[in-house]
Image (cartoon, rainbow, N blue to C red):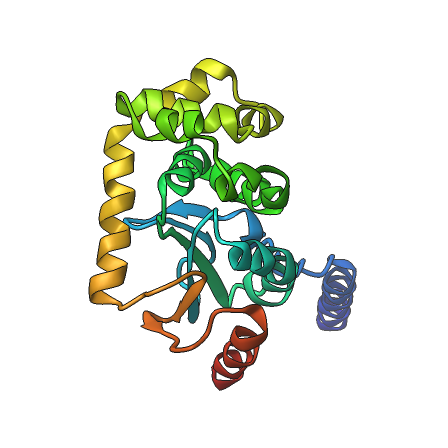
């Protein structure tokens, strides 16, 4: 009788244990890592600014000038596609390097590079997308304008250009004050770095005009538009 009671007790214990095991909540699946928004990942590089995954398999470099109409056209045609299909995936990144062609271009570049790195791409877009509205004086400057742009101290020249081309207004829409703009326009060290970067692109990478492009460090010969770049970029993406 005692043995039967013991066996019955063990059976009840096993049944109770099984019931507890069945009612125990299932373990939660491991949380997925958050999706990174690569369109806000901005980093300063030795020659420019990079947007996107720094470890991307495909790296596009743009050589651009703010007084180049073809560069403005490229910005309007390519920016959305690059952000959606190239950068957002984490598989591609874009680096913009200034290729300085003239004093007006240099002045604009001083301003797009003004402030922290995370402001660059919106500054860049502001100048490129409004180019048609501000570039007119470059085609037919008055003698007085030519004199202001080429004479006097460095900061005096760049501020004269910024005033004549409406650059102060553009920067104001970006949240900059006049003293902040003046400080950036006086940055001769940055101007020298931009000039040096331009010279290196011309002499070591054989960049001869803007816009020009490189994929993974290799400059694309005869490629100066979104129409010419797009199929090469798509082919490189498919290859990976």
Name the outermost residue toward the top: 179
Residue farthest along the front direction in this orientation? 143
User: Viewed as shown, does residue 154 lie left or right of 132?
Assistant: left
Res 6 → quadrant: bottom right
Count how many numbered circles sit on residues in the image: 0
Picture layout, residue 50 above or below residue 14: above
Quick one: quadrant of the N terminus? bottom right
Q: For residue 157, which quarter of the picture? A: top left
Above or below: residue 48 compared with residue 214: above
Relative depth, front residue between 100 and 103 = 103
Residue 159, percent across and down?
41, 23
153 lies left or right of 212: left
Place of residue 104 in the rendered image (x, y in percent of width and height, measured from the top left): 42, 38
Task: Name the residue rendered at 62%, 45% in the picture.
Answer: 132
Q: Residue at the location (34% across, 20% down)?
A: 156
Which residue: 44% across, 28% down?
Answer: 145
In this view, the residue in front, 240 or 178, is 178
Q: Position of residue 91 (x, y in %)?
A: 50, 68
Which residue is found at the position 58% from the left and 37% from the top? 134
Image coordinates for residue 120, horizontal then vertical, percent? 47, 40
């Amino acid at each position: 009788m005692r043995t039967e009671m013991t066996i019955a007790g063990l059976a009840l214990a096993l049944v109770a244990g099984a019931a507890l095991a069945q009612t125990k909540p299932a373990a939660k699946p491991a949380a997925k890592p958050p999706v990174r928004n690569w369109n806000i990942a901005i980093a300063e590089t030795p020659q420019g600014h990079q947007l996107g995954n720094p470890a991307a398999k495909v790296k596009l470099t743009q050589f651009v000038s703010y007084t180049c109409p073809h560069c403005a056209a490229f910005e309007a045609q390519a920016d959305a596609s690059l952000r959606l299909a190239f950068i957002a995936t984490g598989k591609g990144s874009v680096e913009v390097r200034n290729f300085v062609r003239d004093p007006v271009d240099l002045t604009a570049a001083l301003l797009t590079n003004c402030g922290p790195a995370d402001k660059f791409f919106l500054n860049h877009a502001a100048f490129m997308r409004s180019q048609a509205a501000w570039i007119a004086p470059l085609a037919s400057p008055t003698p007085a304008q030519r004199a202001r742009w080429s004479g006097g101290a460095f900061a005096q020249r760049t501020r004269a250009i910024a005033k004549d081309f409406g650059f102060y207004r553009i920067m104001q829409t970006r949240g900059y004050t006049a003293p902040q703009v003046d400080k950036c326009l006086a940055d001769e060290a940055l101007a020298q770095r931009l000039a040096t970067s331009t010279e290196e692109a011309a002499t070591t990478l054989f960049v001869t005009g803007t816009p020009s492009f490189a994929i993974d460090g290799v400059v694309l010969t005869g490629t100066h538009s979104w129409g010419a770049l797009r199929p090469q970029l798509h082919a490189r993406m498919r290859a990976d």
